[in-house]
Image (cartoon, grey):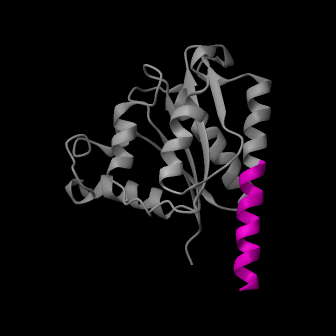
């Protein structure tokens, strides 16, 4: 049996990326708590076949492999930098390629980063509806971090760390509950 994955995906297009570092931190915490392996990607990892793709079959094997890990993961941690009040276009493009039922019931932690507090509702007004369409199990606690919450690319805000721990605890509980339901069946 292969070890379950916690997959993180960042909608950032630049490196180094605060968003990817943020997603990596959360995914690593979740993986450690549930005995899974973390794998974190950003849109750049999908390579040159991704932007023009109209369907999954248009992706090269490496990009398809990342998407397969994403869809088959036990838990997802998704996030995007805020760009003009929403997630990045290529972040959305990834989800445009997925079958609408592919994320049904999958536990997901939502996160976003932005330059300031005025974009903090991206997680509620942009990300949560997107994953609602997919009927995913988004955790009640979503996490937004602004530039002031980072120093040298690392998350330094204790308030944001606490919020991340809360979301991780929620997903750990959800994963445990789904395992218990599976055992009872």
- Compared with 144, 31 (above or below) is below
Which quadrant holds residue 164?
A: top right
Q: Nearer the viewer, residue 162 or 184?
A: 184
Q: Please give the range of residues in magenta.
A: 169-185
In the image, taking residue 33 as reference, residue 112 lies left or right, namely left
Q: Nearer the viewer, residue 52 or 41?
A: 52
Q: Is residue 168 magenta?
A: no
Position in image of residue 45 (x %, y %): 36, 42
- Compared with 75, 143 (above or below) is above
Q: Main secondary structure of the magenta part?
A: helix
Q: Residue furthest bottom?
A: 185
The residue positioned 53% from the left and 38% from the top of the image is 127
Q: Quadrant of the image for the C terminus?
A: bottom right
Q: Is residue 179 magenta?
A: yes
The residue positioned 78% from the left and 49% from the top of the image is 169
Position in image of residue 117 (x %, y %): 63, 15
């Amino acid at each position: 049996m292969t070890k379950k994955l916690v997959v993180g995906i960042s909608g950032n297009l630049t490196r180094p990326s605060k968003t990817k570092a943020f997603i990596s931190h959360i995914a690593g915490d979740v993986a450690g708590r549930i005995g899974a392996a973390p794998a974190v990607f950003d849109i750049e990892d999908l390579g040159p076949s991704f932007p023009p793709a109209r369907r999954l079959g248009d992706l090269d094997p490496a990009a398809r492999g990342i998407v397969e890990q994403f869809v088959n993961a036990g838990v997802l941690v998704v996030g995007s930098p805020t760009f003009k009040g929403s997630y990045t276009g290529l972040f959305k493009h990834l989800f445009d390629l997925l079958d609408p039922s592919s994320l049904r019931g999958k536990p997901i932690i939502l996160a976003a980063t932005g330059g300031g507090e005025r974009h903090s509702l991206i997680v509620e007004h942009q990300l949560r509806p997107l994953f609602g369409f997919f009927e995913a199990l988004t955790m009640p606690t979503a996490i937004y971090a602004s530039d002031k919450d980072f120093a040298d690319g690392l998350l330094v805000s204790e308030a944001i760390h606490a919020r991340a721990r809360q979301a991780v605890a929620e997903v750990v509980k959800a994963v445990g509950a789904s395992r218990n339901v599976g055992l009872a069946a």
